[in-house]
Amino acid sequence: MFSMANATTPAESKAAGVAFLAENAKKTNIVTTASGLQYEILTPGTGTAHPTATDNVTVHYKGTTLDGAEFDSSYSRGEPISFPLNGVIKGWTEGVQLMTEGAKYRFYIPSELAYGERGAGRAIGPNATLIFDVELIKIQ
């Protein structure tokens, strides 16, 4: 199996993500959608409405790479963030629509639903699979 610590090329990063997601899918608490997004429910929501892709949402989140390195966190900044749900990566747009207010999910996002071959700066390389803890605070 590939390790992210040894993934130095985009192809190795892609292979490491595919291997990770295949193993992760075997866990009983992991749900895999048709697109390949994986998620687990950390805290069920208290609301009944689900956001649509065109809604604005307010969330708290933490994003990490497969090796556990944190690359972004609203928790670290000390305040949640609001944005249009269709203005973020595909994995977020799909995953947050599964949530209700008050829910906290962990998303395992394959590279093709994240930043794909282009990556995103130094912290997120090409073909990186990403992990996000997302807490849906409000649907606007």
Image (spheres, rainbow, N blue to C red):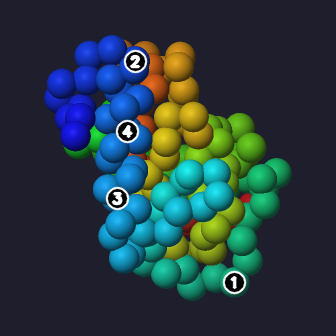
Residue 103: horizontal and vertical position, in percent? Answer: 51, 73
* Label at residue 17: 4
Q: Earlier in the sequence, mark 1 or mark 3?
A: 3
Amino acid type, residue under disc 4 in the picture:
Gly
Amino acid type, residue under disc 1 in the picture:
Thr
Residue at the spot 33% in from the left edge and 14% down from the top edge: 9
- Asked if residue 20 is positioned above or below residue 117 in the image, the reply reads below
Query: Callout 4: 10 Å neighbours few (<14), some, many (20+)?
Result: many
* Label at residue 48: 1
* Label at residue 10: 2
**Badge 1 element:** loop
Instruction: Please report contact status of discs 1 and 2: CB closer than 8 Å, yes or no.
Output: no
Residue nearer the viewer, 7 or 108? 7
Mark nearest the camera among 4 and 1 is: 4
- Asked if residue 50 is positioned above or below residue 134 in the image, the reply reads below
**Badge 3 element:** helix
Q: Earlier in the sequence, mark 1 or mark 2?
A: 2
Mark nearest the camera among 1 and 2 is: 2
Query: Callout 2: 10 Å neighbours few (<14), some, many (20+)?
Result: some
